[in-house]
Amino acid sequence: MTDLVEASQLNLVLCHTCGKACDATRALHECDRCGAPLHERKPNSLARTWAYLIAALVFYIPANLLPVMNTQMLGEGEDSTIMSGVIEFASHGAWDIAVIIFIASIAVPATKFVALGLLLVTVQRGSTWAQKERSTLYRFVELIGYWSMLDVLVVALVAALVKFQALGDIEPRPGILFFGLVVVFTMLAAMSFDPRMIWETRPPKEHTDEVSSH
Amino acid sequence: MLDTDQLIICEHCDCVYHKVPLKKHQKALCQRCGAVLQRYNGMTLQQRLALSITAGVLWLMANFYPVMSISLKGLSNSATLWDSVLALADGPITFIALVAAISIIIAPMFQLAILIWVLGFALASKRSPGFITFMRWLESLRPWSMLEVCLLGAMVAVFKLAGLLDVLPGIGLFALAILSLLMIRIAGRDIRELWDALP
């Protein structure tokens, strides 16, 4: 294995938008190819990731407790939460659908909380433990992120279809708003996290963005 | 002075590598963190443009034909993607309708319009007007475009309703299925090659 060289040793900065290796000796603030702002690390990465993650965690509570939709069939109304939807599928014997919804709506957000929390804590300690595996974990979090939108889109479609007034009517309920917010905030959290911090062996100094400090 | 055009920096750990020519099915991985640095992409400009235009037509079909229709005791109803977004827009939860609209209608629409525009000019070896802005938009739009999630959602909805009433998948659903697969192929990160192709 050849010796690996880091970009900072060669005075290079990666442009996150177009992937160009930019020359840092010229002290550019913008990529000379696409004009996107250049940073050695994503600005305020740790603080931003924590903030988005905690916001998502707060929204995760009403997302699971409040009903996501209301089904009216022949005069009988019934609210259902995400979990009760899963249980209903399972009790009708539709195990496959129950598993898909459970994974997308409950397991994926929970995995993201645990994984991002783990990444944040280990990075703050400057840990050298399982760096390659943690890199893979981050890529996994990025990959699974948006699949949690599944339930939002299911509720939207079902509510748009079942509109027969007295005979049958399905309406969305506020739980779905909080659920969507969980997805959006966990996605923002994953985007704010800079995976290159995993490979910094000293506890990282917060990379603040001097340009934008007012 | 290094020739920086021939260098790749790993996004996930900042290691620097030289670009290598890849053969079919090959990809270059970072030795330290295992991230993908380069992936073989056998698509020519013409092919990508042709697929983008196809996807544009499919986008129209997915949006103007109903995704599915249902019937219950003689009554029937159908819904398009836009109807589903509107179904979320009532009451205090309007914000989520906006998120849904962006992820299944607006983001893919802009992605396709930009791709067709940029690739059309690229065919004549020219940078299109607004090339830099549009290329950056493609990067910002990508994470918010969720057609494949929408496809799975539509299929789950079919099963969810099939127990209660008769469900009939519509043309929109088939268009959505092909469109979501095409988007993965044409709107991926490899579009960044245009930066090098059009200096």
Image (spheres, rainbow, N blue to C red):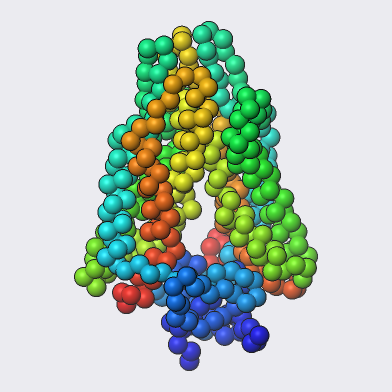
Can the viewer see residue A44? no
Q: Residue at x 37, y 40 (%)?
A: B174
Q: Residue furthest bottom?
A: B1
Can the viewer see residue B164? yes
Give the left or right position of residue B152, taking residue A42 as reference: left
Q: Quadrant of the C terminus of chain B?
A: bottom left
Q: Quadrant of residue B133?
A: bottom left
Question: In this view of the protein, which residue sits in the foreground, A172 or A201?
Answer: A172
Image coordinates of residue B182 in percent, x first then y, are 38, 53
Give the left or right position of residue B181, taking residue B127 as reference: right
Q: Residue at x 60, y 39 (%)?
A: A100
Residue B112 position (above or below residue B8): above
Image coordinates of residue A18 in percent, x first then y, are 44, 69
Q: Residue at x 60, y 36 (%)?
A: A96
Image coordinates of residue A143 in percent, x first then y, are 57, 55
Q: Residue at x 48, y 92 (%)?
A: B1
Question: In this view of the protein, which residue sits in the foreground, A116 or A25?
Answer: A116
Question: In this view of the protein, which residue sits in the foreground, A161 or A129?
Answer: A161
Residue B199 position (above or below residue A82): below
Q: Quadrant of residue A77?
A: top right
Q: Quadrant of residue A195?
A: bottom right
Residue B170 position (above or below residue A138): above
Image coordinates of residue B61 in percent, x first then y, are 30, 40
Residue A169 position (above or below residue A37): above
Q: Residue furthest left?
A: B124
Total label count?
0
Give the left or right position of residue A76, taking residue B91 as reference: right
Q: Residue furthest front?
A: A93
